[in-house]
Amino acid sequence: MACFNRWQVSSLDVSGTYLYSPVEETVLIEPPTTFLPHLKGKVLRLKKALYGMKQGGRCWWFFLSGILERMGFAATEVNQSLYLFRNDQELIAIWIHVDDGVVTSNSLGAISRFKTALCGELGIKWSDQLTHIVSLNCAFGEGEVTITQGHLNNGILEAYARRIIKCDAPLPVLPAGSAIPNQDALDPTPYRSVPKAKHWLLLDHVVGYLLKTRAHRIRLRPMSLSLSLWSDVGWGGDLECRQSGFILKLGDAPIHWSSKRQTVVALSTCAAEYVALSSTPGAGNKSTRQKIHQYNFLQQSGGGTGFNQQPLQEAHEVS
């Protein structure tokens, strides 16, 4: 949406995230007597969250939500990490992932005021450009953004000790992936501890595909804000897993995709296609649900100048 409307996209990084978050519950800890020997034999009450606490992330979320709500932001209905601020003329959208955030707006003045207000509450490292977020590298051009995973892929390739051969596909056409051939029922708990040579070959294939495609990029350049959903299922060609997948596009830009084993047994190709398209909890991919979520977000945000409030279009399956 930001690319389509030519909005500025900024990024922020909160320093010492959890240390801002107050702990409302009574939590007692043993003091580090190596550094504070005079506290030996005493306990301390924890007032701020610490890294490593199971509830640390929750405390931080409550604290940050309170700050944003006081500024007039509200979390979207479909994504509690995405906040919107709207008035008659301005829109600000901010997405938060722990201590990282992405901010975009139709007004440079609104971004400047938000930056000043947030820096008054927290220690913020602010950048007027988004270059990376959650292991993704981003490069913005005129009305487009290019996304790569070079840093993440290179880390996997450097840590892999076996010989790597480039491969053109993620997996062979018909991988034999069963850990144990058909036989009497065995205890299933140790199945991950008995990898066979064929499993190492499959892993080699996956890593080889990463090597071959580590320079591949996804270019997001939406020419419109219309949503389209495509789904498919390998009902007859995938005898073991019955996997299905979908891709959701905003204009011609892919924004969400998934491939997953179906959790509902389908008795025909047609039924399997309906399962792939379904938004029920047992369907696995929840493709239609994702489209509804994205549509609701565009409605809440107004979609800038390119969203025409058209009703949802159902995906058509060809068997």
Image (cartoon, rainbow, N blue to C red):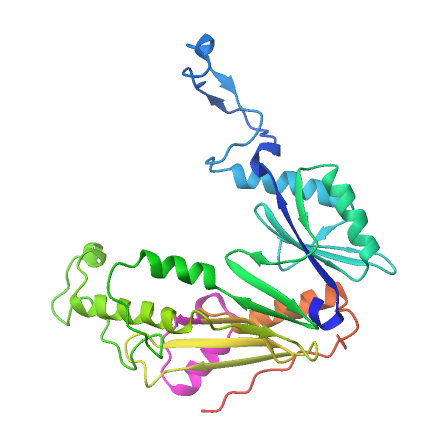
The C terminus - image quarter: bottom left
Which range is magenta?
259-283
Compared across the picture, whether 112 is left or right of 254 comes to: right
Compared across the picture, whether 213 is left or right of 165 comes to: right
Above or below for 194 versus 39: below
The N terminus - image quarter: bottom right
Specify whether residue 208 is in view: yes
Q: How many marks?
A: 0
Q: Name the residue: 38% across, 79% down.
A: 266
Q: Is residue 277 magenta?
A: yes
Residue 35 placed where, x, y %? Answer: 45, 16
Above or below for 110 versus 35: below
Compared across the picture, whether 196 is left or right of 105 comes to: left
Residue 141 placed where, x, y %? Answer: 67, 70
Above or below for 80 versus 281: above
The foreground one among 15 and 306 is 15
Residue 67 placed where, x, y %? Answer: 71, 41
The residue positioned farthest toward the bottom in the image shown: 319
Residue 86 placed where, x, y %? Answer: 80, 57
